[in-house]
Image (cartoon, grey):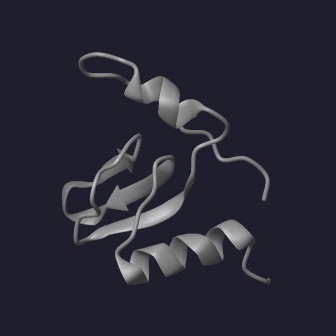
Amino acid sequence: MPATRTAVRAALLTVLGLTVAGDVGYYAPGNDRVLYYGDQSSYPGIVVLGHLDGDAAGRIAGMDGAITATVEVGAG
C-alpha cells in the first residue's frame, strides 16, 4: 500500500524534528497526544501523526485553560 502524502509529510517532519501549527503528534513515554496550535518548538520523542483540518489550530489557540479534544481519523 503506498504511503499517503500526509504520512510522508509526518514522517519527514518527525525525522527533521520540525512541527507546524496544526500538527498532531504522539509522545510514547507518556502515552500523550499533542496538538500543535501555535509557534511551539518540537520536542524529542514526539512523532507527528498528521495535521488538523481547517482552522482547528487557530480555534484551539484562542481558547483559555485546559481543553478536551476528540480526534477522528478521516479517509486518506
Residue 35 falls in which quadrant of the image?
top left
Name the quarter where the C terminus is drawn: bottom right
Q: Is residue 70 visible?
A: no
Name the quarter where the N terminus is drawn: bottom right
Say left or right for 17 vs 8: left
Residue 66 falls in which quadrant of the image?
top left
Q: Residue furthest front?
A: 39
Say left or right for 11 vs 32: right
Front-most of 17 and 1? 17
Residue 3 falls in which quadrant of the image?
bottom right
Q: How many marks?
A: 0
Residue depicted at 36% across the width and 48% down the height: 33
Residue depicted at 22% across the width and 71% down the height: 44
Compared to residue 11, the image places residue 59 above or below, namely above
Residue depicted at 39% across the width and 70% down the height: 18
Q: Position of residue 23 (x, y in %)?
A: 49, 53
Q: Is residue 66 visible?
A: yes
Say left or right for 25 vs 43: right
Say left or right for 38 vs 50: left
Q: Position of residue 69 (x, y in %)?
A: 44, 29
Compared to residue 29, the image places residue 31 above or below, namely above
Q: Position of residue 75 (x, y in %)?
A: 79, 52
Q: Position of residue 43 (x, y in %)?
A: 23, 64
Residue depicted at 67% across the width and 36% down the height: 54
Front-most of 48 and 40? 40
